[in-house]
Image: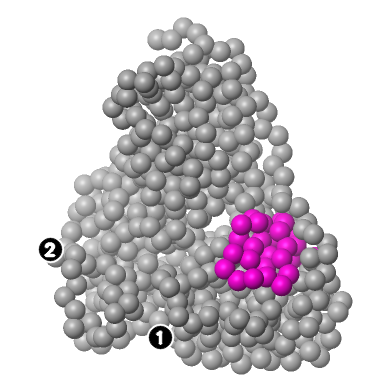
Amino acid sequence: MPESHTGADLFVDALEAYGVRYVFGNPGTTELPVMTALADSDLDYVLAPHEDVAVGMAAGYASTRRYRADEESGTPAGVVNLHVAPGVAHGLGNLYGASVAGAPLVVTAGAHSLDFRHEEPILGGDLEALTEQFTKWSAEVTDVSALPTMLRRAFRVATTPPTGPVFLALPLDVTMAATEADPEPLGPIQNPGGGDPGAIERAADLLVEADDPVFVVGDHVPRHGAWSDTDPVDAAVRLAEASGARVHAEILACEVDFPADHDQWVSYVPPDEDLAAAAMNTDTVVLAGCSTHTTLTRHERELIPGDATVVDLNDEPWQVGKNHPADAAVVGDLGLVMDAVAERVEDRLDAEEREARLERVAQFKTFAQQQMAGIGEDDAPDDPRASKAELVDAMRSVAPDAYVVDEGVTAKYALLTRWPFARESYISNKGGGLGYGLPAAVGAAMAEAERDDPREVVGFVGDGSYLYYPHSLYSAARYDVDLTVVVPDNRNYRILKDNTLDLFGGDEDEYEFVGMDFDPPVDLAKNAESHGANGHFVELPDDIEERLEAALTEDGPSVVDVLVHD
């Protein structure tokens, strides 16, 4: 056993000082000093059987804790420890997902000793080059004396809005080196500020001058309310009401950015160019906190008319004017910015004009509801399997107050159009890479369990997504995580078939889809049981609610595999 206080001990001391509770990971030899130090700490090490599962769990945990960062005694950051180049490479899929989701994540990895790399040992590689495109900051600690400062920087960068992952490589000789240093204090986390007053005035003027404003809210809106004196979702409501705008959520929205029961709320914008262009076919568009507001593949039509006035509000400079030139642009704390714009619009917009705008909102909302009314409903009456709509309705009936982690992919919009989620009750896989949702649901359930009155956590994970990392359930079972996973199971990669038809046209019966069907199918219920979870298989719609109720009352993780038709 090491007799001196080492860099690894200092690393663990810093985690404890910053209020970290869990370290997610899959260990290797270069992590052994950290593992030894963890054994003498109050931290819990959460073992994942794959590095990408560890990253996904840590991201789901961090994204959930971020909502209540102001209530926590420590940082909301998730911490994950990976192993040299292959381990970091394994974790890149969900590191990408965490980056797009803005998860406040501190990713570390053991690395070969600095004085050994000239021999090109196995498992070596440039860890910074691997991670830098998916992080806010990527670095290597090359001396133990730098470790306290670099750890403090890592946590500050990860948790400062706009939040996101950071990466630190920890060479073996650094973590084994003796040190007498103490962790540096983290200090308060600042918000991005109130924005340029002149730009705020300009944004207000353009909204007052508009004929028919459309307000598109994005996932950056709710992410840092805990760092602000102004609730950003409330500020979005105030701005919508002040301007009389109809409200949509950005394409690929994956959080609750606006109350779905508000009169001016219309819809989530799906990644369909015709529907998206119809929603934004107007003279003035306000983009607030948007980052993924475009289609999955190249679109032929303009999503926003070329002659439209665009007001772009964000907490991240990179996102402002990214895809559409902005006539007014404001960077800052979205709650403060939207509140400031709303205050000015309230004073300047004539009440009669506001009322006329609201009448147009009601008319468009009726049209949009008619267009989207059938999403997920039964279009195969002779198919005995449930429709996606039936599954969603059953989930909402049984667990109306659940915290839902979604990677349903082709079932996503059935979920969003039929379940008006309350704020901070829904997150999804914003990055689009499969294999994020199931481990993120495990991490989210661990975060929710820390609350005095935890909610039910339901993972809504398609069969294709589930099969990426079913061994996430091993960790859930090992640590007795209370989680119910619902699998809308159509036994194929439906999204790829849909995209084939979008790209090439024609009818489905004209294609032989290569590599897109699970034939023979995997028994997901038995698979869940093999990892220590409870497993349920549901063939008929009438049995869904009963099985869901049973799963929700079981201890530990449960998987409910529900057959659905395409």
Query: On the image, numbered disc 1 is attached to which residue?
Result: 374
Which quadrant is the N terminus positioned in?
top left
Residue 232 is inside the magenta segment: no
Q: Is residue 119 visible?
A: yes
Seen from this angle, which residue lies furthest left? 520
Does the CB distance between marks 1 and 2 fall below 8 Å? no
Query: On the image, numbered disc 2 is attached to which residue?
Result: 520
Residue 464: x and y in percent read 28, 61
Q: Is residue 266 visible?
A: no
**Left or right: where does residue 171 sit relative to residue 468?**
right
Q: Which residues are magenta?
A: 311-340
Question: Which residue is rendered at x = 79% and y = 59% of the image?
Answer: 196
Which quadrant is the C terminus positioned in?
bottom left
Mark 2 burial class by Cα count in 10 Å: few <14, some 14-19, many 20+? few
CA gap between label 1 and label 2 equals 31 Å
Question: Which residue is rendered at x = 33% and y = 79% of the image?
Answer: 502
Question: Which residue is rendered at x = 59% and y = 29% of the image?
Answer: 150
Within the image, what quadrant is residue 147 found in?
top right
Which amino acid, mark 1?
Gly
Q: Secondary structure at mark 2?
A: loop
